Amino acid sequence: MKEIRGNVIVGQSGGPTAVINSSLVGVYKTAKDRGANIVYGMLHGIQGLLENRVVDLSGHIKSDLDIELLKRTPSSYLGSCRYKLPEIQEDQEIYKKIFKILDDMEIEYFFYIGGNDSMDTIKKLSDYSILNGSRIRFMGVPKTIDNDLAATDHTPGYGSAAKYIGSITKEVIRDGLVYDQQSVTMIEIMGRNAGWLTGAAALAKCEDCEGPDMIFLPEIPFNIEDFMKKVAKLHERKKSVVVAISEGIRVEDGRYVCELTDNVDYVDAFGHRQLTGAARFLAGRIARDTGCKTRAIEFSSLQRCASHMVSRVDITEAYQVGGAAVKAAFEGETGKMVILKRISDDPYICVTDIYDVHKIANIEKKVPREWINEEGDYVTEAFLSYIRPLIQAELTPIMADGLPRHLYCQDHRNE
Ligand code: F6P
């Protein structure tokens, strides 16, 4: 017989991914199947919870079709936030408020789907809960296209973004060959201070495509003069040059290349600067110095919302980590995050486990130096062997009138 459980609440936080809603479904379905009473969703994460903005998810996910649509819906269904909780010793009021809201709703299990900043929230809430004898269990569910979470082999969201980047880079390279004249196409890829996503541009190199000419990750300081020389050298033997750069590349003195532009800087609650404009800046420099045709393409949010091209491996794992978090919390775990442990590459086998969130929150996992070539302008075959299993297979969108159909949350404010 199914055990009767208390109430559950789930939120989504940080930048979205194409498969983050599959984790939401994983939490919802598993909690319901294991006897949860009400499963609430926070609108816009902890920030919305503080304003009592919650929904009963059973009013949103009403059929098997809703489940399938939600899995295939990009962006965070519940809305997201970048909200940093204060240190517990600095301000207890906000914690008292959160726990009062949770107690009033008779919440016993709290799940937060997010990256390293969101795990900071799980860490602080679980610490406060233990200090104050609360019986609420707090579990982190990993997600980020950046793939920069410690302890886990990779993060849900990364495989689909990498598949999209590999695919679209191939298409951009094909397009770059169209005219019989010299050109440079600069591609800018997300990932902040980690180069996992930018390295995925190398997937474009295959039987029918020569791949990008150079790839620059934020792990290696970027020298603009060396870069200009390398482009000139490439132009001695080929017309169309395609270069992938991370949004987070920095010059030797530590400044982001995008800071050399006249962009207006937006900085979020965690102190992260919005990184944008490095490709445009470098394309402008090439055009000015050489007169050659340039194009700057920022993949921007396209790379994290392309739900029409998800990796089936990724969307399946996104569901599994949601389910594993519920199982662990129902078994009494708290202050942990679900991690993925790769057992083998071929055949690809990966299992879930749990890990202390204190050793994950706020830590950025970088691409190892040995997975970047000696010159610092490409990734190695070992990097590609790591990434390839994560982009395999597809999940077809459910099409309506020629376009992918989504499930959208009507409780969102956009005013
Ligand atoms: O957290 C993932 C991410 O997509 C980063 O790669 C990127 O720098 C950042 O989010 C952008 O965040 P926002 O959507 O808040 O501007």
Image (spheres, rainbow, N blue to C red):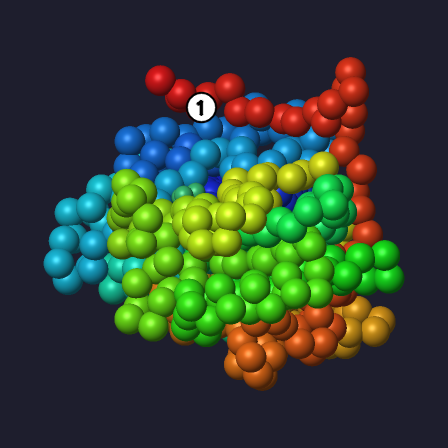
Depth check: give the residue in front, 353 or 328: 353
Q: Where is residue 176 in the image (x, y as percent from the top left)?
A: 69, 46
Q: Where is residue 397 in the image (x, y as percent from the top left)?
A: 76, 33
Looking at the image, residue 267 sits to the left or right of residue 106; the answer is: left
Depth check: give the residue in front, 244 or 413: 244
Residue visible at 32% across and 31% down?
Answer: 52
Q: Give the quarter of the figure containing the C terminus.
A: top left
Looking at the image, residue 209 sits to the left or right of residue 386; the answer is: right
Residue 297 lies in what quarter of the image? top right
Residue visible at 43% across and 39% down?
Answer: 80
Query: Helix, strand, or loop for circle 1?
Result: loop
Q: Position of residue 349 (x, y in %)?
A: 77, 70
Residue 354 lies in what quarter of the image? bottom right
Q: Name the residue under label 1.
A: 412
Q: Position of residue 18 (x, y in %)?
A: 61, 43
Residue visible at 13% across and 58% down?
Answer: 90
Looking at the image, residue 102 sits to the left or right of residue 372; the answer is: left
Disc 1 Cβ-to-ligand 1 distance below 8 Å: no
Residue 110 appears in the picture as rendered: no
Neighbor class of circle 1 (other Cα within 10 Å; few <14, some 14-19, many 20+) is: few
Residue visible at 78% across and 20% down?
Answer: 402
Q: State whether residue 139 is above or below residue 288.
A: below
Q: What residue type is labelled 1?
A: His
Residue 225 appears in the picture as rendered: yes
Depth check: give the residue in front, 75 or 226: 226
Q: How many marks?
A: 1
Depth check: give the residue in front, 373 or 356: 373
